[in-house]
Image (cartoon, helix red, strand yellow):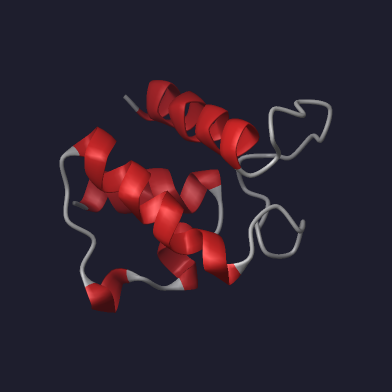
Amino acid sequence: MALETSQEIRDFIVTNFLFGDSSKKFKDSDSFLDKGIMESTRVLELIEFLEDNYDITVEDDEIIIENLDSVTSIVNYLERK
C-alpha cells in the first residue's frame, strides 16, 4: 500500500502544485515548504484530495506540518488513520 499511496500523492503534487512539471525533482522525504512546492494556502486542496481519495476525515488538530509536509509524512499519517 505505501508504495502505491506514495505514487498517488506524488502524482497529485506534481499535477496540482507543480502544474505537471515533472522535471522538478523531490524525494518523498523532502519538505514541501522547504522545497517551495506547497505554501500554506494549498493545504486545504491537499486535505480535500486526501479525504476524497482515502475515505478519511482530517481533523483540525491533525492539520500540522508533521502530518502533511512531505510524501513520507502523508503516507505515515494515512497509515495511522
* Image location of residue 3, percent across then percent down: 44, 24
Q: Is residue 24 left or right of residue 29?
A: right
Q: Nearer the viewer, residue 30 or 33?
A: 33
Q: How many marks?
A: 0
Q: Is residue 16 above or below residue 44?
A: above
x then y, percent, for residue 8? 45, 27
* Front-lying residue, 14 or 65: 14
Q: Quadrant of the N terminus?
A: top left
Q: What residue do we see at 41% from left, 73% from top?
A: 64
In the image, what residue occupies the spot 51% across and 33% down?
12
Residue 62 sits in quarter: bottom left
Question: At 56% from the left edge and 33% from the top edge, which residue is drawn?
Answer: 10
Image location (x, y in percent) of residue 23: 83, 27
Which image quarter: residue 79?
top left
Q: Residue furthest right?
A: 23
**Place of residue 27 in the rendered image (x, y in percent of width and height, measured from the top left):** 69, 39
Q: Which one is in front, 80 or 19?
A: 19
Q: Image point 67% across, 64% down: which residue? A: 33
